[in-house]
Image (cartoon, grey):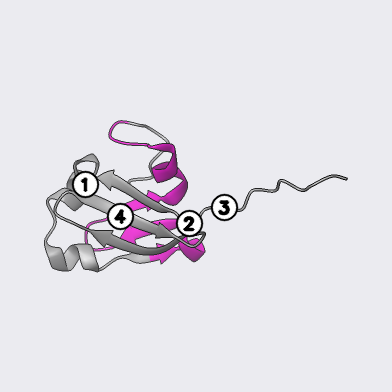
Amino acid sequence: MSTSTAKARPVAKSVRVTAHDLIVELADGRTISVPLTWFPRLAHAAREQLLNYELLADGEGIRWPELDEDLSVAGLLRGSGPGAAGDRPSRRR
């Protein structure tokens, strides 16, 4: 008997930001919490800006349009913090 081990892509269901953490609840029931200091644009943003986020690609990514900040859920799960080139799609202009 064989069992399929196809991995579902992790997707965000909701996002919260506290004074110190970015907290992402996943559709599969897991919760990711990472230090807000990993993302300076978020760490220095106003509360109203942090509340204005969009889930991208059915929850595979998170975007803060006012801050021009995009994060991938897969990158957060890998623990991709500051300076992890290619792991965390943060748009810089």
Extreme-front residue of the structure: 1
* Position of residue 36 measured from the top left corner of the image (x, y, whole percent): 21, 46
Return the residue at label 3.
Answer: 9
Judging by the rendered image, the residue that carries numbered circle 1 is: 36
- Residue at image position (25%, 68%) is 52
Q: Is residue 56 above or below residue 10?
A: below
- Segment colored magenta: 55-83
Q: Residues within 10 Å of mark 2 (few under 14, many from 20)?
A: some
Badge 1 amino acid: Leu
How far across and how far down the image is residue 3, in percent? 79, 47
Q: Where is the N terminus found, in terms of image quarters?
A: top right
In this view, 84 is above or below 26: above
| Left-right relation of 92 to 80 | left
Structural distance between the alpha carbons of marks 3 and 2: 7 Å
Q: Secondary structure at mark 1?
A: helix
- Name the residue carrying label 2: 60
